[in-house]
Image (cartoon, rainbow, N blue to C red):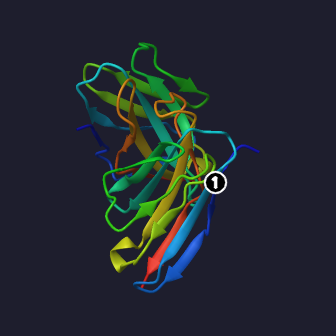
Amino acid sequence: EAQVTQNPRYLITVTGKKLTVTCSQNMNHEYMSWYRQDPGLGLRQIYYSMNVEVTDKGDVPEGYKVSRKEKRNFPLILESPSPNQTSLYFCASSLRPRDPLGYTFGSGTRLTVV
Amino acid sequence: AQTVTQSQPEMSVQEAETVTLSCTYDTSESDYYLFWYKQPPSRQMILVIRQEAYKQQNATENRFSVNFQKAAKSFSLKISDSQLGDAAMYFCAYRRGNTGNQFYFGTGTSLTVIP
C-alpha cells in the first residue's frame, strides 16, 4: 500500500531532551515536507526537501532540523525541545515539488513537551 | 506572499442537507492548484477535491463540488446530502504551479453534522 509512515503517533517528552520523529514513504516521491498544525493557525511548513541531500527551511524552522540521506526517509529532529513545540506534526510527500495531485500525508504525531 | 483565508471557523449542517465552506486566497500568479483536505477525528489528512487554475470547469467528486471564481480568488466547497461521516475539519490549500515549493493552508473550518 502506498503510504507515508510517521512514528511515533504520540510522544510526551521533557524540555531539552532530544527527539526524532521518523517519516518514510514508499512511493519513490522526490518531495517531502514537515508541517506543524496548531489551533487557529492551520498547517505551517517547517522544512522541506526537493530530493536526496536537498533540504530547505519553510516558514517556521526554528528549533528543528531535518536530513534527507535516502529518498524514502525524512526525519524531523528536535535537538532541545521546548513547550512551544507542543503541536501536531505531519509529514507529507509528493511525486515532485509542483505535483498537481497534491500531497500524501502521514497520520500525524501528537507531541507534548513538558 | 500567498495567503489562504477560511473565514468560517465552525459550521454546522443538518444531515442530508447541503453546506458550503468558503475559501479565498491571495496570489499574483496565474498558474496554481487549489485543494480541499478533510481531517476527521482520526487526524488523517484526506484529499477531498482539487482544481487546476487553468481549468474553468468546476471540479466535482461525488457529493463534493467546488465553486471556483478565479477573478474573485474564491474557492468554496459544497457538500451535498451531508452525512455524519462528513463531520471533520476542512482545510483549503493553495499550491503554486510554476515556481515555489509549498502548499499554503487556511486555518480550517470545523464542520458538524447534526443527525
Q: Is residue B113 visible?
A: no
* Residue A60 in picture, x, y percent from top left: 32, 58
The residue depicted at 62 percent of the width and 28 percent of the height is: B62
Quarter where residue A41 is shown: bottom left
Assign the N terminus of chain B to one quadrant of the image.
top left
Q: In this orientation, which residue lies closer to the viewer: B24 or A21?
A: A21
Q: Is A75 drawn above or below residue A56 in the view shown? A: below
- Above or below residue B6? Residue A77 is below
Quadrant of the rendered image containing residue B66: top left
Q: Position of residue A100 (x, y in %)?
A: 50, 27
> How far across and down, in percent of the image, does residue A108 sit?
55, 60
Residue occupying the point 59% across, 57% down: A23
Amino acid carrying mark 1 in the image: Ser
| Closer to us: B76 or A105 | A105
B100 left or right, relative to A6: left
Q: Disc 1 designates what residue?
A: A24
Disc 1 is placed on an element classified as: strand
Q: In this orientation, which residue lies closer to the viewer: A4 or A48?
A: A48
Q: Is residue B77 shown above or below A46?
A: above
- Asked whether residue B47 appears in the rendered view, the answer is yes
